[in-house]
Image: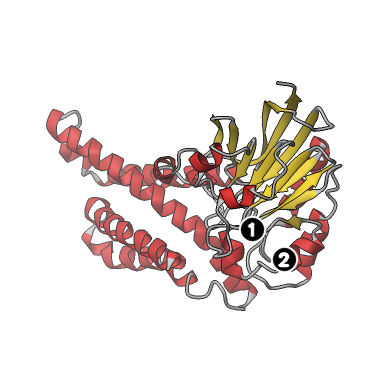
Amino acid sequence: MFRLMITLVYIVPNIYVCLRIMQLFINKGHRTKYFLIYLLFALVFPVSNLFWQNDIGFLANTIIGAAGYFLAFYLYLFLSLLVFELLLLINLIFRVVPIKRLKEGRNQTIILSVLLGLSALVVIGGIINFNTIQVSDYRISIPRKSAKIEHLKIAFVADFHLKEETNIGFVERFVKKVEKINPDLMLYGGDIVEGNRHNTKMEDLENLLGQIHPKYGVYGVLGNHEFYGGQDKGNFFEKAGIKILLDDNVLIDNSFNLMGRFDGHFNRRKAIDDLMKSVNDSFPTILLDHRPTELEQVSKTAVDIQLSGHTHNGQLFPISLIIQNMYRLSWGHEKIGNTHFFVTSGIRLWGPPVRTTGKSEIMVIDVDFVRI
């Protein structure tokens, strides 16, 4: 259903783009050829959605993999064309450039090339941004209570969306970054792996993630994509050395509680008040919850830190503006009451491998346990 919705949102603006470019820039003698070429490229994304779960050949998989680039390109071509239409309207009012000159063949070619070139450059920049791992550093203080330790360094990521097509080199760079950070605790905030298939490529990914061995271990929670893909049994996580917390809590080093919630898609998810009944509140509490949807309720409990993902920080402008209005905290850090909330924009993405807003990040949170 979600893919169908995205496809419809993709098709409607494309109809507008196709017709307006034809009206504004294409001579009548070339319109049939233009229409066929446009249709050929524009259909790559919706057609790819018909085969996304099927076992097909390498060439077909490559084409499907490229479909996300087309989605991003046509989004920015649509926006570029809207801006151009606005400029045409302004020019119609103030007559800055004679309309006759704008209709000259050479100028039409230049304008169309600029629209296509700008859209392509934005996508290229988004690809580079997506493939560049960045570290976001934070430092906070929380009540020490009965903790033995005075400091904790957390490395936190979410939304890896690992699958057979995932670039091994990216995961290798991620592991090296984490090793350089040298955290005390490694946490994953859900949507770690797609589907439940297992092959040599997935084994390579498991082995890579299994190289991360921080002092206090590696933990994670499930996201909505683990629910979709049937990964709630956690075979991948066990082999990758990730302990999944399913609405339960562990006391680590007799110093802090680490609690993980089921995503809201799982009907087994407990209410936060019920979950807190199993927690020894004489120790600080860190909570993993894939989606940042219950911030006010959590802030009224003894939770000191909540870590979430899911939002991707919108991933593509202007979708990011919608996401910012959907969540109180769509990315970054906010303290509500006595609880520190963190939402990461994700280490990778689902969908187009292009990121024009936010960053592919590892959150590093230095926590000082202080006497109050």
Discs 2, 1 touching: Cβ within 8 Å: yes
Q: Is residue 66 left or right of residue 246?
A: left
Report the front residue among 163 and 125: 163
Residue 340: image quadrant is top right
Q: Is residue 139 left or right of residue 51?
A: right
Report the front residue among 230 and 306: 306
Res. 222 mark: 1
Q: Residues within 10 Å of mark 1 (few under 14, many from 20)?
A: many
Q: Secondary structure at mark 1?
A: loop
Residue 129: image quadrant is top right
Q: Position of residue 153 (x, y in %)?
A: 77, 34
Report the front residue among 87 and 158: 158
Res. 234 mark: 2
Can residue 204 be seen from the camera position used here? no
Query: Which residue is located at x 63 percent, y 47 percent?
Result: 276
Q: Secondary structure at mark 2?
A: loop
